[in-house]
Amino acid sequence: MGRFRDLAEARIRDAIEEGQFDDLPGKGKPLVLDDDSNVPADLRGAYRVLRNAGLLPEEMELKKSMVTLRSLIAAAVEDDERARMESELRDMAIRFDVLMQRRRRAGLNLGRYRSAVASRLFGR
């Protein structure tokens, strides 16, 4: 992944030199990295513990893997390798959709979702 990282860094440097980032909203302001306003208030503590431990919910880990895989596909040179990764990405996308559907259903039954989160966190 060294070549990919070098390529990404070079493109970022070029974009900075060309001024493509000069008019972005929030320029010069600190990033809000711990915005948990979309997490239900009673789950924020548990999510904060998970985040501080370097853990993400399963769907976010999967989404992170999908972003990485898309970058690798874009940098792939060999067609058979690209095809293999695209197949893997399709499988991940299906799994992500299933997880999100479960989360939406759990939103209808928030008590069950809270219990599932608590059991994952505390083994209850």
Image (tube, grey):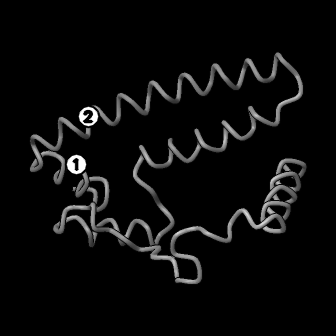
Mark 1 highlights which residue? 116
55 to the left or right of 97: right
> Quadrant of residue 16 in the image?
bottom right
Q: Sequence order check: which comes first, mark 2 or mark 1? A: 2
Query: In the image, is residue 87 above or below residue 73?
Result: above
Mark 2 highlights which residue? 102
The total of numbered circles placed on residues is 2
96 to the left or right of 103: right
> Quadrant of residue 77 in the image?
top right
Percent position (x, y) of residue 28? 59, 83
Percent position (x, y) of residue 47? 33, 65
- Residue 124's label in the rendered image is none
110 to the left or right of 83: left
**Dots 2, 1 in contact, CB < 8 A:** no
**Secondary structure category for the residue under label 1:** helix
Q: Which of 107/53 is in front?
A: 107
Query: In the image, is residue 43 above or below residue 30?
Result: above
Q: Of the residues shown, which amino acid type is indicated by label 2?
A: Arg
Q: Which of 122/7 is in front?
A: 7
Residue at horizontal 56 percent and vertical 22 percent from the top = 90
Q: How crowded is mark 2: few (under 14 residues within 10 Å), some or many (20 or more)?
A: few
Residue at horizontal 77 percent and vertical 23 percent from the top = 82
Q: Of the residues shown, which amino acid type is indicated by label 1?
A: Ala
> Quadrant of residue 22 in the image?
bottom right
**Secondary structure category for the residue under label 2:** helix
